[in-house]
């Protein structure tokens, strides 16, 4: 009995010792907070007139028209327009230079008529918006002050998964709130239509409304990111937070100071995932970005990049998925030469491409296509196609002998892939389809269970579409 009790006590002692060792291994954040909290500021962006945002939310829209109408009916005179009302967006920021330059998010100060900054010592300043960039969601502010406390800028390229991270900010207006967690992922692309050029640092650091624009620190007390977004189904923190890498943010700052706007590099290609076409392209894995379209006259076009090439690397950085490429190209200085590693016909090669400048104004180009009559069919793929006459081909900007038009979608697989009448099929399994006969020849070898790789043009967009032939065909 005594022996059993002794073993139990020894086991208990070992457990206590292990817990103590784990407690000692946890980092102490007090030094980071004491040094940097004075340089973290509370931001209030006031908007007068008809508001377009709710306070404190990224891109949060004002209430729908039907709710506005309901309020007007009960709280205003019928038929009267909505009365202007002031709103205040709350956020965070941090001082990057002692003479008063402050970094925050664009969405915090967007459309603001007045921006107020409050320091930890309770001093308040009116800030000028020096410049901002919605694509990167970065804004540069300036206050008229000197000898201000500043943060130390780190290197976000050295960030690794599993490292500790600390955030300081003003969630819900609670100044100097400190939260911590670990780096969950780096180079995270959210597939967001308005931010395709940002690869975020993902953490589990608790971030809430009002944290936007605040700094993310490493254990050395250096800023590695700007807290920007959360993923949430409730509007509150759910363990997924995203920060803009500080290298990207400081690049924006430099460009705003030098020229007042932000330039982004442009390769001149449209890319998509390769996952569906690994077998078609004889790839060893699903890494890379598949070139679906090359912009005529672009650097990629002049360097000889082609549809069907798979981009594996850009300036020494790996491209493991299509979403990796835009941020790498975007941060590259226009006019510089970039080394692009591609896979073509199963062989790796490196191409030197002169990086262009992405237009700051997007011009929508429209091209109309009529729905032609039914022609030759490819029953295995569930498509009916027909030749394109010379005049229509010229109107569509196609070269002689280029493409066939989908006259009818006859199968559910093609329909579920999004194909529709009027689409132009340029290639099947990397074979040019300049006629209905060429199309039939290209699909002749496609068997049940195979995935045919079609290069399809619709309006001015070109992309690869995979159609898997049903096994019962």
Image (tube, rainbow, N blue to C red):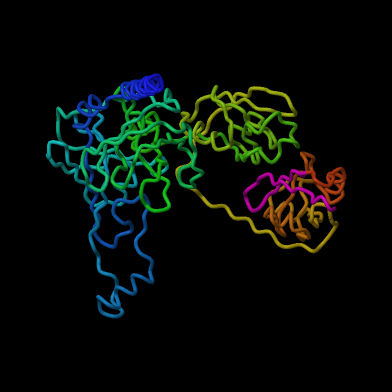
Q: Is residue 312 left or right of residue 456?
A: left
The number of callouts visible is 0
The residue under the point 69% across, 47% down is 465
Q: Establish if 81 lies above or below 345.
A: below
Q: Is residue 268 left or right of residue 256?
A: right
Q: Position of residue 319 (x, y in %)?
A: 57, 30
Residue 464 part of the magenta segment: yes
Residue 280 part of the magenta segment: no
The residue under the point 77% across, 46% down is 402
Q: Position of residue 192 (x, y in %)?
A: 48, 46
The residue under the point 86% across, 49% down is 440
Please tell me in which quadrant of the rendered image residue 343 appears: top right
| Magenta residues (range) | 451-473
Q: Establish if 65 lies above or below 450.
A: below
Say which of 13 and 37 sits in front. 13
Please tell me in which quadrant of the rendered image residue 452 appears: top right
Say which of 440 and 469 sits in front. 469
């Amino acid at each position: 009995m005594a022996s059993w009790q002794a073993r139990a006590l020894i086991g208990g002692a070992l457990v206590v010792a292990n817990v103590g060792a784990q407690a000692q291994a946890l980092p102490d954040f007090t030094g980071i907070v004491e040094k940097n909290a004075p340089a973290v500021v509370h931001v209030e962006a006031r908007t007068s007139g008809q508001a377009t945002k709710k306070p404190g939310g990224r891109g949060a829209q004002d209430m729908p028209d039907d709710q506005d109408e309901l309020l007007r009916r009960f709280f205003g005179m019928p038929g009267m327009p909505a009365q202007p009302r002031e709103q205040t967006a709350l956020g965070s920021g941090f001082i990057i230079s002692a003479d008063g330059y402050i970094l925050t998010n664009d969405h915090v100060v967007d459309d603001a008529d007045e921006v107020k900054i409050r320091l930890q010592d309770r001093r308040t300043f009116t800030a000028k918006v020096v410049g901002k960039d919605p694509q990167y969601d970065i804004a540069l502010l300036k206050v008229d002050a000197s000898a201000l406390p500043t943060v130390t800028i780190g290197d976000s390229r050295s960030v690794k998964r599993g490292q500790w991270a600390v955030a300081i900010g003003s969630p819900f207006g609670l100044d100097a709130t400190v939260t911590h967690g670990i780096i969950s992922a780096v180079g995270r692309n959210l597939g967001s239509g308005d931010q395709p050029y940002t690869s975020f640092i993902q953490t589990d650091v608790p971030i809430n409304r009002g944290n936007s624009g605040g700094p993310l620190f490493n254990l050395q007390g250096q800023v590695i990111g700007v807290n920007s977004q959360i993923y949430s189904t409730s509007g509150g923190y759910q363990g997924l937070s995203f920060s803009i890498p500080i290298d990207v943010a400081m690049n924006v700052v430099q460009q705003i100071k030098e020229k007042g706007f932000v330039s982004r590099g442009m390769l001149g290609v449209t890319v998509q995932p390769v996952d569906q076409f690994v077998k078609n392209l004889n790839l060893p894995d699903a890494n890379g970005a598949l070139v679906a379209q090359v912009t005529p006259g672009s650097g990629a076009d002049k360097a000889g990049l082609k549809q069907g090439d798979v981009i594996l690397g850009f300036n020494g950085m790996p491209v493991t998925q299509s979403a990796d490429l835009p941020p790498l190209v975007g941060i590259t200085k226009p006019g510089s030469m970039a080394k692009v590693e591609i896979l073509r016909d199963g062989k790796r090669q490196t191409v030197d491409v002169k990086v262009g400048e992405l237009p700051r104004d997007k011009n929508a180009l429209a091209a109309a296509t009529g729905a032609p009559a039914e022609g030759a069919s490819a029953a295995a793929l569930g498509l009916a196609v027909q030749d394109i006459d010379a005049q229509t081909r010229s109107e569509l900007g196609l070269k002689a002998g280029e493409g066939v038009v989908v006259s009818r979608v006859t199968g559910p697989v093609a329909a579920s892939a999004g194909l529709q009448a009027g689409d132009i099929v340029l290639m099947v399994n990397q074979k040019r389809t300049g006629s209905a006969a060429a199309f039939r020849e290209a699909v002749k070898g496609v068997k049940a269970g195979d995935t045919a790789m079609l290069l399809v043009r619709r309006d001015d967009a070109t992309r690869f579409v995979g159609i898997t032939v049903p096994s019962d065909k």
